[in-house]
Amino acid sequence: MSKNWRPATQLVHGGTTRSQHGETSEAIFLTQGFVYETSEAAEARFKGETEGFIYARYGSPTNDMFEKRMCMLEGAEDARATASGMAAVSAAILCQLKAGDHIVAARALFGSCRWVVETLAPKYGIECTLVDGRDLQNWEKAIQKNTKVFFLESPTNPTLEVIDIAGVAKLANQIGAKVVVDNVFATPLFQKPLELGAHIVVYSATKHIDGQGRCLGGVVLSDKEWINENLHDYFRHTGPAMSPFNAWTLLKGIETLPLRVRQQTETARRVADFLAEQPQVAKVIYPGRKDHPQADIIAKQMTGGSTLVAFELKGGKDAAFALQNALEIIRISNNLGDSKSLITHPATTTHKNLTDEAREELGISAGTVRFSAGIEDSEDVIEDFARALKAVKA
Ligand SMILES: *Cc1c(COP(=O)(O)O)cnc(C)c1O
């Protein structure tokens, strides 16, 4: 397999293995187990002397193709596909920690990710400090003798803040800690955390990788040594394995990832520019616009904008609800990365469990709205916004 393939080619051909039938499209191997010709063959497989699968909780052919394709795209040596994004995040963090260790995490995290580090980890004696990740000094100040993991998401959900991944990696390397990056919002096309110095990358494949709203999935990627020493046994024995059916759906999904993300990014960029001109809108946050507060870091670490736009309506919750309710093409949903354009009011849905204070820290106000661009014609999406904004007082 050529390492020199460009991403669009990797995503169509990477990792494909064919059965004796020579099928064009990847096959789904919906099997729990595998049979051995002889007792000796079974013994050799269990001793690790021969290559091959043992049990679908450990690995299976369709999942293997998905993992290899993701490795190629990410530039990672090894990967494990998981049943959901949260299975990937929790496995990546917990597999390498024990009681007495310490995590430093950016406070702007996807809700369940924040629960894992803030609420779950401490139950097992793993301490966690949450910081405003935009300032590298905050990461440095939070370091303790027992700090083992730095965890961040960039751009963040929902306000699209950006964190200097190379800067965080440099701090981590000084103390021998590992950096785990949740790269969902950037997509594997626009940001390569491993090249920036991060050690482990996780995805919710549920989002852009499936991209058509069908199945849950996740993936953890890193170097072979880290996977073997940390994730390998944890993954086998705790059982977050992805269904082969979902691995197949996701394999077909990533074939079209570059086409979809290109169209979504184009629409998101146009929507951001359109919204910035509207009297009802107080503020637009879009990585890729010159007025993004961290445009300098974006230029350093991202090769594309985003498929998401965050904006704030002057009229608060009433304005946000009126806008959402008046939209016809863009659907109200907490999901993102779908081929259908979606809109969310974080304060009453995805971020409703945070305290008012925590929401304020994250820049989520009553008027904050998150838009996830689909693959519809950009013109129709903008017309939908233009029509719906008429229902919102300026
Ligand atoms: C959706 C999401 C997750 C969780 O993924 P699931 O597939 O829903 O479990 C984690 N991190 C980010 C940034 C997400 O958007």
Image (cartoon, helix red, strand yellow):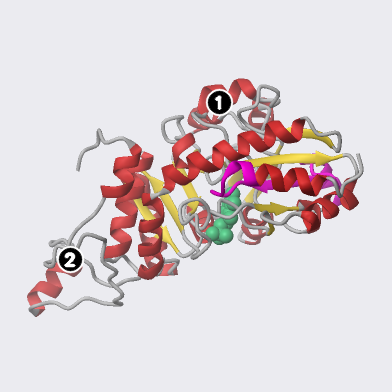
Which quadrant of the figure contains the C terminus? top right
Q: Position of residue 285 (x, y in %)?
A: 71, 34
Name the residue rendered at 58%, 28% in the picture: 164
Question: Disc 2 marks which amino acid?
Answer: Lys
Q: Position of residue 297 (x, y in %)?
A: 59, 24
Let me know if residue 61 appears in the view.
yes
- Location of residue 136 (image quadrant): top right
Q: Position of residue 61 (x, y in %)?
A: 26, 64
User: Would residue 135 appear left or right of 248 to someone viewing this image?
Assistant: right
Label 1 Cα neighbours within 10 Å, binned few <14 / some 14-19 / many ≥20: some
Q: Which residue is mark 1?
A: 167
Determine whether the residue tagged by mark 2 lies in a helix, strand or loop: helix
Q: Which residue is mark 2?
A: 47
In the rendered structure, find residue 305 and report the number of the disc placed on it. Answer: none
Front position in the image: 47 or 135: 135
Q: Does 377 appear in magenta?
A: yes
Q: How many marks?
A: 2
Question: Disc 1 marks which amino acid?
Answer: Gly
The image shows residue 86, relative to residue 382, as above or below, that is: below
Q: Does 284 appear in magenta?
A: no
Boundaries of the magenta span: 355-380
Mark 1 to mark 2: distance in Å?
A: 42 Å
Name the residue rendered at 20%, 57% in the picture: 17
Label 2 Cα neighbours within 10 Å, binned few <14 / some 14-19 / many ≥20: few
User: Would residue 150 appear left or right of 320 to someone viewing this image?
Assistant: left
Name the residue rendered at 32%, 66% in the picture: 58
Determine whether the residue tagged by mark 1 lies in a helix, strand or loop: helix
User: Would residue 387 appear left or right of 19 to someone viewing this image?
Assistant: right
Which quadrant of the figure contains the N terminus? top left
The quarter of the picture showing ligand 1: bottom right
The image shows residue 305, relative to residue 19, as above or below, that is: above
